[in-house]
Image: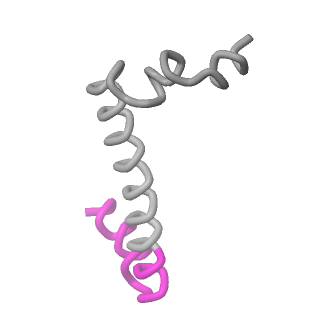
Amino acid sequence: MAFSTTLYNTFFQRNSVFFSTVFAGAFVFGIGFDTGVTAFYDRWNRGKQWKDIRHKYSETAAEEAE
C-alpha cells in the first residue's frame, strides 16, 4: 500500500505532473519503439538495402572508401 500511496503522491496528485509524465513517457516510448523497429528492419533486410549494395554501383562510394 505504501508504494501506491507514494506513486499517487508523486505522479497523479497534481494534473500538471501527471500530464507531463504521460507526455514524457509517450515521447521516450516513441523514440525507443522507432529505434527498435529500425534496427529490426535493418537486420532483417541486411544485404538488400541501398546502403549495403551501394559500393557495387556507385563509383563515388568506392573513391570515398579509399
- In the rendered image, the vertical position of residue 15 relative to residue 62, given as above or below: below
- In the rendered image, the vertical position of residue 32 relative to residue 1, given as above or below: above
Nearer to us in this view, 50 or 17: 50
- In the rendered image, the vertical position of residue 34 relative to residue 1, given as above or below: above
- Residue 14 horizontal/vertical position (percent): 44, 87
Identify the main secondary structure in magenta: helix
Q: State the extent of the magenta-drawn residues as a range.
A: 1-20
Picture residue at 32% right of the left edge, 42% below the top: 37
Nearer to us in this view, 18 or 7: 18
- Residue 27 horizontal/vertical position (percent): 44, 64
Q: Quadrant of the N terminus?
A: bottom left
- Residue 62 horizontal/vertical position (percent): 64, 16
Would you say residue 45 sits in the magenta stretch?
A: no
Picture residue at 48% right of the left edge, 77% below the top: 20
Q: What's the coloring here?
A: one colour
- In the rendered image, the vertical position of residue 36 relative to residue 6, given as above or below: above
